[in-house]
Image (cartoon, grey):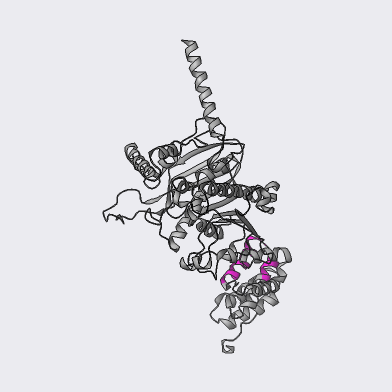
Amino acid sequence: MARSILLRVALLFILCQLGYTAQAGSGFADLKPGPHGVGFRVVQQYDYARSYRDKTDLVTGKPYAGEQARPMQTLVWYPAQKTGTPLRYADYMRTEATDEVLGRTEAEVAAFMDGRRQWATARLGAKQAQAMLAQRMWAVPNAPATTGKFPVVIYAAGGGGVAHEAADLCEYLASHGYVVLASRSLGTRTSLMNFDQEGLATQARDIQFLLSYAHTLPQADMTHVAAAGWSWGGLANVLAASQDARIDALVSFDGTQHKDNTVAVSRMRLTVPWLYVQRRPESVRELSANDMETSSILLNEAKYADLYHVVMNPMEHLDFSTLALRVAQPDHFTEYSRAEVETAYHWTCRYTLEFLNATLKGNAAGRQFLDRTPAQNGVSPHMARLYHLPAQTDLVPTQAGFAAALAQQGFAYALEVYRRMQQQDPTFVLPESALNTWGYQLMRDAHDLPAALAIFRLGTALYPGSFNLFDSLGEADENNHDPATAIQHYRRSLELNPQNSNARQRLQALGAPAPSTSAN
């Protein structure tokens, strides 16, 4: 009896080891795993800071009594110990059942999966569909995490896409030492994405929610964060990076470039390294047929980003989703074969890995990979082209760029640097209120009185009619033990606004007569 139990235990151990050995082999598109195992978990949570459901269901018109907060079911891939039984591709598809309605019953999930099997069968046939659903992946559900801290990658799905659409890439990155998070691309108020500025802002906020959640993960190195995404998600991550300085690098897979969609993205705030991988180039005739305005393209205008632009000639737009590739019909592959398209996807993942290694990990081999031509890296001739557009080294015309320049050159040169930045970019303007606030922050928070004086002086030079800036400059003069200059500035403030009681009180305290109102 004891020997029988030992044999069963030994057999189970061997099967587990074989299971992980299978996982450790080449993946989709012949991707090779890294040194880590891959763990996977599904976190069902809500963003309670935002609503998703109205009190009236927008589809049925009936009253809605369920949870109104935004559902944010989160898929997490992470470096793990090499143990356990990997999941099947059907397990990824199963997560779709609860990516909007988190509390579905097992019976509802089973019914959903029946529908997905029928969908796959209709496209591939019963035998091939079953093989796809049964495919062994790399990830092991809830596998023990590897010790250490790892850079974080937030993945944004294409418009309306499911969180696992790039599961192969996410597993690949996790095996090479990254924590990867993704959620479904939901619209602002329904499951279908609204392709407008509100929908874009919604997905950008989803990225920020996942970034916030990543802070709770013990493995996450939040000092090194990238945002990646495909199509609509490949633009939403750019918007997020232009608004959130915690994002250190960008990866966009054929992100939309339509002028109307990119209006909200501040070109001047895009200052991080950016890998943009696109499908085969389209002719001007094709672009025009698709209503693509070519005179203003974000890729050309993001001149302060260190841009690596890769063109994958065999790939169409849908080919960046391995879910779409798995069910692609034979007639989808015309000029290039399925094998060539999958090879291009392999290199897309490889470029992503090396770019992240170079930018987030400071890896010299990754930087060398980016510096070589695709052919020098082993890519088949005519499959890919790489364009490197280094970031311009000029001063970045934003308040942050201006402050950085003053920190380096000295606040005494504020007006000179400001004029130079305006020559570089005539749209660069620091509002009166921003300068006044900045001066007080320097004086009261940073305790840097000389810098505060320089900013207030800059403000009065740029806005000579601002009574408030002259009043603030007078206060800074007082703190600088310069009453004579303070009196001059308080008097100028009163000349501009005789109702400024603070300037009148300060002049009285300094023993100086206020200017007569008749002078105005």
In percent of width and height, residue 404 lies at 67, 63
- Can residue 73 be seen here? yes
Instruction: Specify the quadrant of the image occupied by residue 513.
Output: bottom right
Instruction: Say whether residue 50 is left or right of residue 59.
Output: right
Residue plotted at (52% across, 23% down): 13
Q: Position of residue 188 (x, y in %)?
A: 40, 57
400 w.r.t. 490: above or below:
above
Q: Residue furthest top?
A: 1
206 up-or-down from 391: above or below? above
Quadrant assignment for the C terminus: bottom right
Count of numbered circles in the view: 0
Instruction: Say if the magenta span includes residue 439.
Output: yes
- Residue furthest toward the left? 62
Decide if residue 473 is on the left or right side of residue 322.
Answer: right
* Viewer-side residue, 305 vs 61: 305
**Residue 184 seen from this side:** no
Which residue appears at 58% of the width and 51% of the height?
Answer: 226
Q: Is 360 within the magenta?
A: no
Q: Main secondary structure of the magenta part?
A: helix
Front in this rendered view, residue 190 or 421: 190
- Residue 285 x/y as whole percent: 50, 68
Q: Which residues fall within the magenta stretch?
A: 433-454
Q: Nearer the viewer, residue 242 or 401?
A: 242
Image-quadrant location for residue 36: top right
Residue 379: x and y in percent read 63, 49
Q: Nearer the viewer, residue 358 or 341?
A: 341
